[in-house]
C-alpha cells in the first residue's frame, strides 16, 4: 500500500515537472518568435553602424552587408578562422574593404579591431571592437575615449615608412598612452600586418561573388 | 504574517539584499561601475523578482515540497531568458553593455532566496510586494554604489544615459569634475569592494545612531528602553 502511494507520488511529481517544463518552453517559444525579427534588425543595425564609422556611407553605393567574401590568413588577420570581408563599391568599382583582425598580444589578451582599407592601400579607418584592456589606461584605443585610433586614417604602408610603424617608445611615430605601451604597440602591429597583406593581395579581397560561390 | 510596511522596510533597509543579506554580490560588484549600468541591471532584477515571486506564490499550493526546487529553478530560468530576449529586442545597446550579467540574474541568490523564503509561504499580493521591495532594495544598493564609483572614477554622473532613455538623453550626462583625470581604483573591481564596504559601514552607523536616539527618547519619557513586542 505504502509502495503504491509513493509510486503515485512519483508520477505526480514527474507530471508536475513535465508540466512546468512545457509551460516554460511555451513562454520562451512565444517570446523568441515575437522578438526574433527585432533582434536580427538590431544586430544588422549595430554591424552597419560599426562599418559606417570606418567607411562613411557616402563613399559606397552597394549593400555592404551582402557583398562579402571570406578569407583565411592567420599570419595577417591574427586568427585561424576565416575572416569576413565586407566590400564597399561605387558603381561596381571597388572602393574599400572592411574586415576585422585580431591583435593577439594586448595587455589582457586579444584585441579585436575593425580595419577599413581603400583600394589604393590607404586606411579608411580603424576601430577597436572588443578588448579587455585596463579601464582608464589601455581603453584609450576606443574611439569614444580618445582620438588616438582616429590617427590611423589616411596612413598606408609607405606613409609612414616601415621603420616608423611603431610606438614612439620603440622609435616610431605613434603615441603610446601614459601607463600603457603594450596596448597601442599591439594595435599598431596588427594594423600594419593587415595593411601589408591587403596591399599584396588586394585582388583576392574583391573576387566576384559568383567566383566565391562556385 | 508580515504587513506591507514591514515587507517594504525589510527589503529597502532592514534586510536589504545588497547591504545586509549580501546576496547577489557578483552582479552588484561587477555592474556598479556607472549609474546607467546599475539602473539597467537593477530594473531587470526587480522585474525578475516580481515575476518569479508572483508565479511561485500562485503555484505554491500545487507544487509538492519534494519537487519545488526544480520547479522554482525552471520558473526563474524561463523568466530570465524571456527578459533577456526582450531586452535584446528593445534595449540592444544596454544589453550589449550588461552582457553576461543579464542571464546571470538566474543565479542571483536573491531570486531563489525570496522564492523559497517568502513567495512559497505567502499570498500572491504579499509575494509581489516582497519581490518589489527586495528588488528595489537591491537596485538601491546598485545605484548608490554605481553613483559613487562613477563620480569618483570618471568624474561624471549619468554618462551613457542614451543606452536606457534613447538618443535624446545623451545630453543628460553631468560632468561633476571638469578635466578630471579619472580615479582608476574606483573603476576597477577593488573599488567596488571598498565602496560596498564603506556603504555598509555608513548604513550600520546610521542604524546605530537611530537606535541610540530612540533609546534616549524612551528613557526621557520614562518608558522602558526596549519594549519591542
Image (cartoon, grey):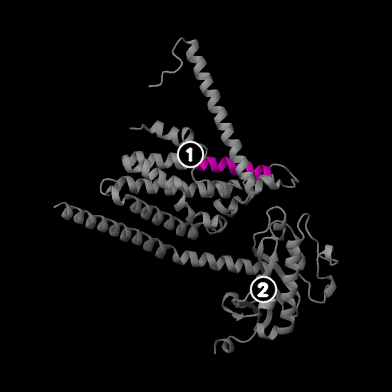
Label 2 lies in what chain? A
Residue A78, which numbered label?
2
Q: Which residues are magenta?
A: B138-152
Main SS, magenta residues: helix
Image coords of residue B182 (percent x, y): 72, 47
> Residue B115, relative to residue A29: is it above or below?
above
Q: Report x, y in % for residue A134.
A: 68, 55
**Would residue A129 be visible to someone looking at this image?**
yes
Check disc 1 and report the residue beneath it.
B21
To which quarter of the image does residue B113 belong?
top left
Q: Same chain for the residues at labels 2 and 1, yes or no?
A: no
Q: Is residue A174 left or right of residue B202?
A: right
Residue B156 shown left or right of residue B11 in the figure: right
Circle 1 crowding by C-alpha within 10 Å: few under 14, some 14–19, many from 20: few
Of B166 and A98, the residue lying toward us: A98
Label 1 sits on a secondary structure element that is loop
Q: Residue at x 35, y 43 (%)?
A: B119
Amino acid at each position: 500500500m505504502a509502495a503504491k502511494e509513493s509510486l503515485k507520488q512519483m508520477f505526480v511529481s514527474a507530471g508536475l515537472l513535465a508540466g512546468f517544463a512545457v509551460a516554460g518552453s511555451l513562454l520562451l517559444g512565444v517570446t523568441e518568435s515575437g522578438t526574433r525579427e527585432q533582434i536580427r534588425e538590431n544586430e544588422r543595425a549595430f554591424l552597419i553602424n560599426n562599418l559606417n564609422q570606418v567607411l562613411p556611407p557616402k563613399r559606397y553605393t552597394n549593400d555592404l552587408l551582402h557583398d562579402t567574401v571570406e578569407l583565411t590568413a592567420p599570419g595577417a588577420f591574427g586568427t585561424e578562422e576565416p575572416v569576413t570581408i565586407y566590400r564597399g563599391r561605387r558603381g561596381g568599382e571597388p572602393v574599400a574593404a572592411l574586415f576585422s583582425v585580431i591583435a593577439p598580444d594586448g595587455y589582457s589578451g586579444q584585441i579585436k579591431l575593425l580595419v577599413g582599407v581603400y583600394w589604393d592601400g590607404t586606411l579608411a579607418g580603424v576601430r577597436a571592437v572588443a578588448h579587455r584592456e585596463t579601464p582608464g589606461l589601455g581603453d584609450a584605443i576606443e574611439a569614444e575615449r580618445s582620438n588616438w585610433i582616429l590617427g590611423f586614417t589616411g596612413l598606408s604602408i609607405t606613409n609612414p615608412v616601415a621603420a616608423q610603424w611603431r610606438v614612439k617608445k620603440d622609435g616610431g611615430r605613434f603615441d603610446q598612452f601614459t601607463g600603457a605601451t603594450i596596448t597601442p604597440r599591439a594595435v599598431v602591429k596588427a594594423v600594419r600586418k593587415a595593411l601589408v597583406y591587403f596591399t599584396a593581395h588586394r585582388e583576392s579581397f574583391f573576387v566576384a561573388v559568383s567566383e566565391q560561390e562556385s | 504574517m508580515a504587513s506591507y510596511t514591514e515587507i517594504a522596510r525589510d527589503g529597502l533597509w532592514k534586510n536589504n539584499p545588497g547591504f545586509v543579506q549580501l546576496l547577489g554580490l557578483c552582479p552588484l560588484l561587477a555592474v556598479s561601475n556607472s549609474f546607467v549600468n546599475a539602473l539597467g541591471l537593477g530594473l531587470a532584477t526587480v522585474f525578475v523578482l516580481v515575476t518569479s515571486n508572483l508565479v511561485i506564490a500562485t503555484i505554491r499550493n500545487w507544487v509538492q515540497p519534494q519537487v519545488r526546487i526544480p520547479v522554482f529553478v525552471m520558473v526563474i530560468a524561463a523568466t530570465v531568458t524571456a527578459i533577456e530576449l526582450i531586452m535584446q529586442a528593445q534595449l540592444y545597446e544596454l544589453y550589449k553593455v550588461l552582457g553576461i550579467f543579464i542571464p546571470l540574474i538566474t543565479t542571483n541568490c536573491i531570486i531563489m532566496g525570496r522564492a523559497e523564503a517568502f513567495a512559497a509561504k505567502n499570498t500572491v499580493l504579499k509575494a509581489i510586494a516582497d519581490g518589489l521591495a527586495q528588488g528595489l532594495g537591491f537596485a538601491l544598493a546598485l545605484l548608490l554604489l554605481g553613483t559613487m564609483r562613477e563620480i569618483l572614477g570618471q568624474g561624471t554622473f549619468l554618462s551613457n544615459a542614451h543606452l536606457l532613455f534613447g538618443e535624446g538623453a545623451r545630453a543628460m550626462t553631468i560632468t561633476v569634475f571638469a578635466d578630471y583625470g579619472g580615479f582608476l581604483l574606483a573603476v576597477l573591481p577593488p573599488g567596488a569592494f571598498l565602496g560596498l564596504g564603506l556603504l555598509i559601514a555608513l548604513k550600520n552607523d546610521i542604524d546605530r545612531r537611530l537606535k541610540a536616539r530612540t533609546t534616549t527618547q524612551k528613557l526621557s519619557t520614562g518608558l522602558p528602553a526596549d519594549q519591542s513586542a
